[in-house]
Each structure stands twice: as structure tokens, then as C-alpha cells.
Amino acid sequence: MDSDELNRFIESWGSMGILWGINRSMARIHAFLLISEKPVDSEEISTSLNISRGNTSMCLKELRNWGVIQRVNISGDRRDFYTAEPDTWKMLYRIALGRKTREFDPALHALRHLLAETDTAESEKVHERLTQIEEILTTMDHFIDRFLENEEKSKTILGFFKNFAPR
């Protein structure tokens, strides 16, 4: 593979990671592991991406918590090596589940509490607007919960919607 293309992918994945709510370094490390054919140790990651060892270590720990990378052992070597989750669907499913849990659920919870505390007599327009948002988000929440109920169901639902995607 062309190293310029690999670097563009790593940087693009890093930028996209920000949209997912993860820091750029973490996303760049994930991209690096996605394109690595063999397990890589933290020193190689740190050096290749020009990221401090401490930041690399923290990012690897967080990526493991997300379940999108794995720590592996290589016989005869005491270092820890890392590899991307080999099952692409499982990786994307875990990202979606993590984002819902970390971002969507708390936002919906906060909105519901705000609605409960909003004095409708004082601000009827605001209350109505927030109620509409809550209704839409609740509908989305039910759909997302069904979609993320389990990996196989998610694959089936996505396969169904794939038929409607433009080619």
C-alpha cells in the first residue's frame, strides 16, 4: 500500500474520531491498528504516529475499553502487542453501542429531567419545543434499542436497509 494513502487514511480516521466523541490520537491509533497486518507494540505505535508514550498507553487502554482493539501476546516476547478487532461488524457494533450509552442516553435523560422541571405556565413555547424534541428522541431511542439489541439482529436490520441505499 502507498504510504501517502495510509497516512491520509490515518489522519482522516483521526478527524472522523472527533465526530464520534473520541480524541484524535485515539482514532489515529485505531486507524494504525486497522491497517497493520500484524500485532504492533505500543513503542512502534508511539514512534510511527509521533504520539507520546503516555498518550499512546492511555489511548490503547480506552480503545480496549471500547472493545475495538485487543491486547495479544507473542510467544517469547514480554511486550504487549495490539491488534484491531478482527470482526469489522463487531467493531462497528461496539462503537455504536458505546456512543449510545455515553452520549445519546445521558442527553435524553437530561432532556426528560428538564421537561419535568420546566414551568409550562412560564414558558409554554419552550416546553412545547422541548416536548417535541423528547418525542422524536424517544422514538429514535426505541429504534436504536431494537437495532442494538444484539449483533445478529443489527446485521439483519442493516441488511434490510441496505436494499434502499443508492448504489
Image (cartoon, rainbow, N blue to C red):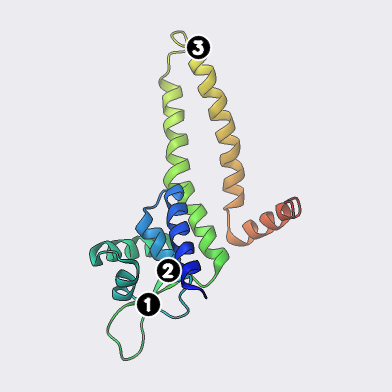
**Residue shown at 51%/63% (left/top)?**
91
Decide if residue 32 is on the left or right side of residue 86. Answer: left
Could you say which is closer to the camera, residue 158 or residue 110?
Answer: 158
Q: Amino acid at mark 3?
A: Glu
Whichever of labels 2 and 1 marks the residue nearer the N terminus, that label is 2
**Of discs 3 and 2, which sits in the foreground?**
2
Callout 1 environment at 10 Å: few (<14), some (14 to 19), or many (20+)?
Answer: some
SS of the residue under disc 1: strand
**Image location of residue 74, percent across then percent down:** 36, 86
Whichever of labels 1 and 3 marks the residue nearer the N terminus, that label is 1
Decide if residue 152 is on the left or right side of residue 87. Answer: right
The reply to whether dot 2 and dot 1 touch (C-beta < 8 Å) is yes
**Image location of residue 152, percent across then percent down:** 63, 62
**Image location of residue 75, percent across then percent down:** 35, 90
**Image location of residue 81, percent across then percent down:** 35, 78
SS of the residue under disc 2: helix
Q: Is residue 93 above or below residue 18?
A: below
Q: Amino acid at mark 2?
A: Phe
Q: In the image, which disc is placed on residue 124?
A: 3
Callout 2 environment at 10 Å: few (<14), some (14 to 19), or many (20+)?
Answer: many
**Residue shown at 23%/64% (left/top)?**
54
- The residue to which callout 2 is attached is 32
The reply to whether dot 3 and dot 2 touch (C-beta < 8 Å) is no
Question: How far apart are labels 1 and 3 at the CA level?
Answer: 58 Å
Q: Amino acid at mark 1?
A: Val
- For the C terminus, the quadrant is bottom right
Whichever of labels 3 and 2 marks the residue nearer the N terminus, that label is 2
SS of the residue under disc 3: helix
- The residue to which callout 1 is attached is 40
